[in-house]
Amino acid sequence: MSIDERHLPLYHAFLEQGLESWLARLPEQLARGLDRQRFGDLPAWERAVRRLPALEVQDVHLTQDTVSVEVAMDDASRRQCDNLLKILAPWRKGPYRIGDITIDTEWRSDWKWQRIAPHLSNLTGRRVLDVGGGNGYHGWRMAGAGAGFVLVIDPSPRFYWQFHAMRHFIGDAGANVHFLPVGIEEVPPNLAAFDTVFSMGVLYHRRSPIDHLRELYDTLRPGGELVLETLVVEGDEHQVLVPGERYAQMPNVWFLPSSKALMHWLSRVGFDSPRVVDEADTTLDEQRATEWMTFQSLADFLDPEDPSRTIEGYPAPRRAVVIAQKP
Ligand SMILES: C[S@@+](CC[C@H](N)C(=O)[O-])C[C@H]1O[C@@H](n2cnc3c(N)ncnc32)[C@H](O)[C@@H]1O
């Protein structure tokens, strides 16, 4: 398989990080993850990103709630950027700002980061994997917190191009953040390479949650840290909800454990000292429709008579963050 020059920075980063065992699989993984036959909108997204104008960047902020790029833009460039970025909509994870264009995303992903960041081992210089990292919003924040190398993996090609739209503006300030359009199942087994691994909003989409935890375990080096964020229900360590066809209108939700059950699962797969560092209901201010995500959102998925239930009658979304160590 020939090597696409656009991906050279990713290959170089893998070499530099000593990820040779994965490197050999990259050409095939990239080709499949960005296959135009599978994803009809891909050419339009790619074209949109390639047409973003080269602007003079004055500053980049990866430590602020809104991942922001200070650029001087005239009216024509502003309109051009706005139109091209809208081709990549819906924008779910953010917020972002480029010049005076604010991408007000469906999720206030910064709120999740605020709940998690105080509990993390210092990320400075660490090698980080963000599994199911969406369009990379948290990946940029990890770099802002000092991570030495951040790899975001997510099988969504739309998110791949949203990431590259931001990368276009962020430039060298985010040169250590990379995106690979694959799912966790494509990560080579027993990698034992990362200092910190995040899995946020992914576990409940997995049909086999214990296997997901084991896959995450295998990506970590001994002594590495797992940060797991997922939907939970109230209850003791035996409490797990397996919803019917849909949960809050999502068709692919499998297991919602209590946070105590989740800690039990983590111990069973071999993690040390799992601890719940946060548990919170998802509010209508954190997940909502915006100009950049105009479809239905959380308000449409809750029972209008009783917002503590989903429209299917299950407990409304509540999320926990658990941190654990690989011995
Ligand atoms: C609810 S979103 C969470 C995004 C982000 N981590 C956050 O917390 O805001 C779940 C993400 O998991 C991704 N995903 C789906 N299947 C996956 C898989 N097999 N491996 C990794 N990520 C997956 C989806 O594309 C989606 O971006």
Image: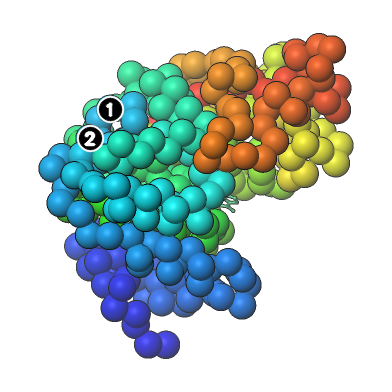
Say which amino acid is labelled 2: His
Query: Closer to the camera, 132 or 60?
Result: 60
Residue 244 placement, left or right of 287: right
Q: Is mark 1 within 8 Å of ligand 1?
A: no
Q: Residue at x 26, y 72 (%)?
A: 8
Q: Which residue is drawn at 54% across and 37% down?
A: 291
Q: What element carries label 1?
A: loop
Residue 139 placement, left or right of 209: left
Quarter-of-image position of residue 37: bottom right
Q: Quadrant of the N terminus?
A: bottom left
What is the number of the mark on residue 197?
none
**Residue 315 appears in the rendering:** no
218, above or below 281, in the image: below
Query: Closer to the camera, 64 or 15?
Result: 64
Callout 1 crowding tier (Cα within 10 Å): few <14, some 14–19, many ≥20? few
What is the number of the mark on residue 61?
2
Asked whether disc 1 touches disc 2, contact meaning CB atoms under 8 Å apart, the reply is yes
| Distance (Cα) linking label 1 and label 2 | 6 Å
Question: Where does the image place residue 2, in percent across and percent down from the top left?
Answer: 37, 87
Q: Is mark 2 on a helix, strand or loop?
A: strand
**Residue 201 appears in the rendering:** yes
Say which amino acid is labelled 1: Gln
Q: Residue tagged by mark 1?
A: 64
- Which coloring applies here? rainbow
Query: Closer to the camera, 292 or 202?
Result: 292
Please tell me how many numbered marks the rendered image carries.
Answer: 2
Question: Where does the image place residue 324, in percent across and percent down from the top left?
Answer: 44, 29
